[in-house]
Image: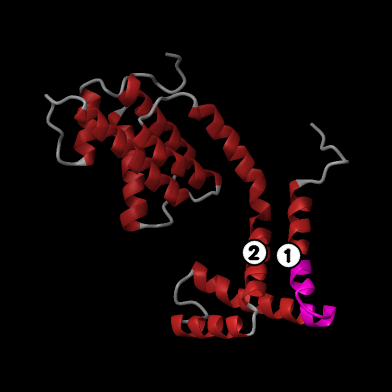
């Protein structure tokens, strides 16, 4: 499929938006020179702030930021800083949109194959957002949370069954009771629960196949909710 030459690409559209940010800064001042100076100042300050946001303890300390924001507000330059930050963040996101669209299509295929409870759906919405934006450790964490909610709901619906004390034992027990269909309870515990635990408690840069983790999570939720396995029709 070729791109319509009459339509701007997403990259061109965003680059145009970045240009509009800078134009908005310039228009706030009496002359283009004053606007350009304000834009330059905003960009320089944004360069200081972003590393501090990404890694606490970076270039600026808390008291320095407080003083900086106070001075910017006094000179009516806070808006210019906000515009500069928007432009820089948009520019950083440019290379990620192709991957985000690919991941969206992957999730679209999976999303219709299970019927989770409303409470579980809240977690799955966050799973989708984290995965599309390539927040892989956060994807593992939210998958674990969604699975935990589904397991809790399944045990709660079986009042005659005692819920084991740990998540690993709960998953293994669910497998023994046939609540996970033909899934491997051991795989589920290793690839969903353990990956989420690692991301939370051991390594925030946890590695693993995030799509596989989502697929296993939805598959398990399908069984726990209504006995449907991902990939099979009801």
> Horizontal placement of 141 versus 159: left or right?
right
Q: Which residue is mark 2?
A: 86
Q: Which residue is mark 1?
A: 21
Judge whether residue 94 is colored magenta: no
| Image coords of residue 155 (percent x, y) | 20, 29
Q: Secondary structure at mark 2?
A: helix
- CB atoms at circles 2 and 1 under 8 Å apart? yes
Rendered image coloring scheme: secondary structure
Q: Nearer the viewer, residue 117 or 74?
A: 74
> Residue 127's image quarter?
top left
Q: Nearer the viewer, residue 25 or 138?
A: 25
Which span of residues is magenta-colored?
22-36
Q: Secondary structure at mark 1?
A: helix
Relative to 154, does residue 214 appear above or below in the rendering? below
| Image coords of residue 191 (percent x, y) | 36, 39
> Residue 92's image quarter?
bottom right
The residue depicted at 33 percent of the width and 34 percent of the height is: 188
| The N terminus - image quarter | top right
Circle nearer the N terminus (2, 1): 1
Judge whether residue 31 is colored magenta: yes
Relative to 200, does residue 19 appear above or below in the rendering? below
> Residue 109's image quarter?
top right
The prevailing secondary structure element of the residues shown in magenta is helix
Relative to 231, does residue 212 appear above or below in the rendering? below
Residue farthest toward the right in the current orientation of the protein: 6
């Amino acid at each position: 499929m070729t791109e319509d030459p009459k339509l701007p690409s997403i990259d061109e559209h965003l680059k145009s938006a970045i240009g509009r940010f800078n134009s908005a800064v310039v228009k706030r001042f009496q002359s283009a020179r004053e606007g350009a100076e304000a834009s330059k100042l905003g960009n320089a300050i944004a360069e200081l702030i972003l590393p501090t946001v990404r890694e606490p303890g970076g270039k600026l300390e808390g008291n320095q930021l407080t003083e900086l924001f106070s001075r910017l507000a006094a000179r009516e330059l806070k808006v210019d800083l906000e515009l500069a930050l928007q432009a820089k963040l948009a520019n950083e996101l440019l290379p990620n949109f192709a991957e985000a669209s690919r991941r969206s299509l992957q999730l679209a295929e999976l999303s219709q194959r299970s019927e989770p409870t409303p409470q579980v759906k809240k977690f799955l919405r966050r799973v989708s957002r984290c995965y599309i934006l390539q927040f892989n450790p956060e994807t593992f964490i939210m998958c674990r949370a969604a699975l935990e909610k589904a397991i809790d709901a399944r045990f709660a619906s079986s009042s005659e069954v005692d819920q084991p004390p740990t998540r690993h034992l709960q998953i293994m027990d669910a497998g023994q009771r046939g609540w996970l269909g033909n899934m491997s309870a051991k795989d589920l515990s290793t690839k969903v629960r353990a990956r989420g635990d690692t991301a939370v408690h051991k390594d925030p840069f946890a590695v693993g196949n995030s799509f596989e983790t989502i697929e296993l999570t939805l598959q398990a939720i399908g069984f726990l909710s209504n006995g449907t396995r991902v990939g099979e029709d009801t």
